[in-house]
Image: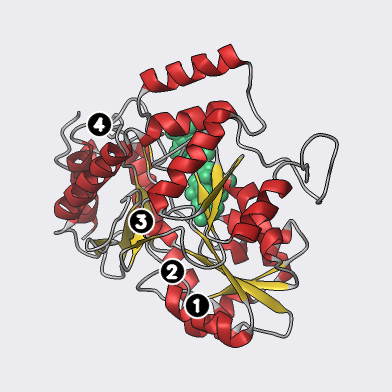
Amino acid sequence: MKLIRSHRDLAINGAQPAYSSPLHVGKPNVGSRETFTRLAGEMFERAWFSNNGPLLHEFERRIADYLGVKHCVAMRNGTIALEIAIRAVGLTGEVIVPSYTFIATAHALYWQGITPVFADIDPHTQNLDPAAVVRMITPRTTGIIGVHLWGRPAPVEPLREIADEHGLRLMFDAAHAFGCSHRGRMIGGFGACEVLSFHATKFFNTFEGGAVVTDDDDLAETMRLMRNFGFSGYDNVIHPGTNGKMIEVCAAMGLANLESIDAAIDANRANYHAYRQALAELPGISVLGYDESERNNFQYIVLEIGESCPVRRDEIVRALQAENILARKYFWPGCHKMSPYRELYPHAGLVLPNTERVSGRVVVLPTGMGLPEGAVAAIAGILRVLLSEAA
Ligand code: T4K
């Protein structure tokens, strides 16, 4: 690692980058390769690669047990899981979602002819603001999709009350929140159902994958049909459907990664504490906190660059990326500023002031089991020099 003592040592000023290969925000965690290889070997012996295989069954049982829910319906990815859940829950017309989320939350609705209506967030929690949700309800509204952004719970109880009062369905995009709890209960058990992502970049991955978890027997049954073209046994289709199935090799990866899930969380927790300590003195920069009386996966290190920081957010990202530290501006600029929503709602920003403010000041930093030793100190050192030169 190069020494960074002054602005001349920064890569944006022409020095060598701090890292010769990139440090990614979403570098995959890999659990037991031995377990994966054994399970994949058994899969080859069986010559059974998809369609309700034994690894899928085992994986679904283990996920449902881990979360304390009755059903896990594993899918090809989180987006198809969202699409299937939205259909199975019966959402139509307009559905209220945050704009400050990954684009899949909105697209999963739009793709099915449903209008996502964006409600603003609370700038402190970065999750949906219940009062803003109420303001966006119209006669066409059929439901609300809360997002547990960064794994921090959405306002579950207020959203439940709003949904009950207005006769709306409530479900959650829990893509970030596998392994997290709310009021002592694992996320996965709230609303009609919750949707998980096991994408490569998530702290727990099945290469790509996702799932819908629910306690509702009928909903689970419908989603099992929907993910397999509506087939009920050979030659008998009893429901419209698509191909949303998780394949066996992905379930094998999930089972291998379940063995090391505690180690992945421990690594993330240690990185989170190290970042908080190392960045504590930097003016105008704060690390978004996790409620440690609950269970957390600590998978996102989220910085907020405040007004008092002498360097703007985009300049910080540019400086880190020049060092091969691939910090990200998640989820800038907000879904409402991406197509097709920016054309549909050109003035949406007027009712989304917190979304615009927060998405303009967030930086997400690399973490995970593969974060090189000394990386937190190196990143803190780069930021310290960058800020002190600008002050
Ligand atoms: N809802 C929410 C709230 C979500 O955040 C997501 C997904 C979904 C729904 C949908 O779930 P999925 O259908 O994806 O299961 C990434 C992920 O692709 C996406 O899954 C995730 N959210 C989102 C937050 O992050 P991008 O566009 O940032 O991906 P990309 O290609 O820029 O990769 C991110 C970083 O990870 C890069 O620095 C490269 C690195 N990386 C990536 C891959 C795939 C690796 O180091 N290794 C890898 O294998 O969306």
Residue appearing at x 44%, y 64% in the figure: 360
Q: Is residue 310 visible?
A: no
Q: Secondary structure at mark 4?
A: loop
**Mark nearer the N terminus (4 vs 2):** 2
Location of residue 240 in the rendering, given as x and y in whole percent from the top left corner: 81, 51
Q: Is residue 391 visible?
A: yes
How far apart, in angstroms, are the residues tagged by discs 1 and 4?
40 Å
Residue appearing at x 69%, y 84% in the figure: 138
Q: Which residue is mark 3?
A: 180
In the rendered structure, find residue 159 and report the number of the disc placed on it: 1
**Mark nearer the N terminus (1 vs 4):** 1
In the rendered structure, find residue 372 and report the number of the disc placed on it: 4
How far apart, in angstroms, are the residues tagged by discs 4 and 2?
32 Å
Q: Secondary structure at mark 2?
A: loop
Q: Secondary structure at mark 1?
A: helix
CB at disc 4 and ligand 1 closer than 8 Å:
no
